[in-house]
Amino acid sequence: MSEETIYSNLKQLGGDTVLPTNPEEAELERVENPQAGVRYAVRFTAPEFTSLCPMTGQPDFAHLVIDYIPNKFLVESKSLKLYLGSFRNHGAFHEDCTVSIGRRLEEFLDPIWLRIGGYWYPRGGIPIDVFYQTGEAPKDVWIPDQGVPTYRGRG
């Protein structure tokens, strides 16, 4: 007899999965926040994010930092990893990738607060950093600096 938990409906964790071919196909999963009512920050760092330039098809690389203050839900990390990986063969400008990820997480999780920093490595000699935030950061939660310096030969 199995017991129902907040993890019971997860489909990707603990099993074989295939990297989705595009972000629209990728399925994010969430669980109930077992600490709902407690304000705290969660950070995901993806230092090897890749997508494709929609014009040239050449790869673009970024260091993403996603911070959020959960409300009722937490994003399941394997589903987030697969979602981010689905951009590997997806053509979009840096701004579109970064903001799309932030907006999808915002719509999916309905967090108290969310921000994403997309620190893109240079192509053509110009690095592009893109930032999206849902509003002013709450004053009662410690939210550290994202810790990624402005471009000076990042790496």
Image (spheres, helix red, strand yellow):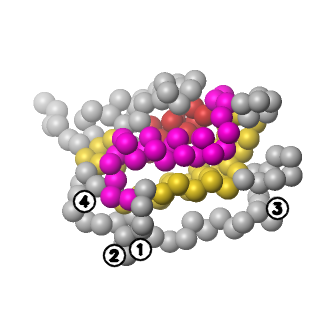
Cα distance, mark 3 to mark 2? 35 Å
Judging depth in this view, the residue of 71 and 30 nearest the camera is: 71
Q: Is residue 46 visible?
A: yes
The residue that disc 4 covers is 35
Q: Are marks 3 and 1 in contact (CB under 8 Å)?
A: no
The residue that disc 1 covers is 142
Up-down: is 60 above or below 15?
A: below
| Neighbourhood count class around disc 3 (C-alpha, 10 Å): few under 14, some 14–19, many 20 upward | few
In which quadrant of the rendered view does residue 131 lie?
bottom right
Q: Are marks 1 and 4 in contact (CB under 8 Å)?
A: no
Cα distance, mark 1 to mark 4? 16 Å
Question: First in sequence: mark 2 or mark 4?
Answer: 4
Position of residue 80 measured from the top left corner of the image (x, y, whole percent) = 47, 41
Magenta segment includes 140: no
Question: First in sequence: mark 1 or mark 4?
Answer: 4
Label 3 secondary element: loop
Amino acid type at mark 2 = Asp
Up-down: is 44 above or below 104?
A: below
Magenta segment includes 91: yes
Label 2 secondary element: loop
Position of residue 87 measured from the top left corner of the image (x, y, whole percent) = 61, 34
The residue that disc 2 covers is 140
Region of the chain picked out in magenta, as a range? 89-113
Q: Main secondary structure of the magenta part?
A: helix
Cα distance, mark 3 to mark 4? 40 Å
The residue that disc 3 covers is 153
Q: Is residue 42 visible?
A: no
- Left or right: 81, with 73 as reference point: right
Position of residue 116 measured from the top left corner of the image (x, y, whole percent) = 53, 55
Amino acid type at mark 4 = Gln
Q: Residue at 48% of width from left, 57% of height from top?
A: 133
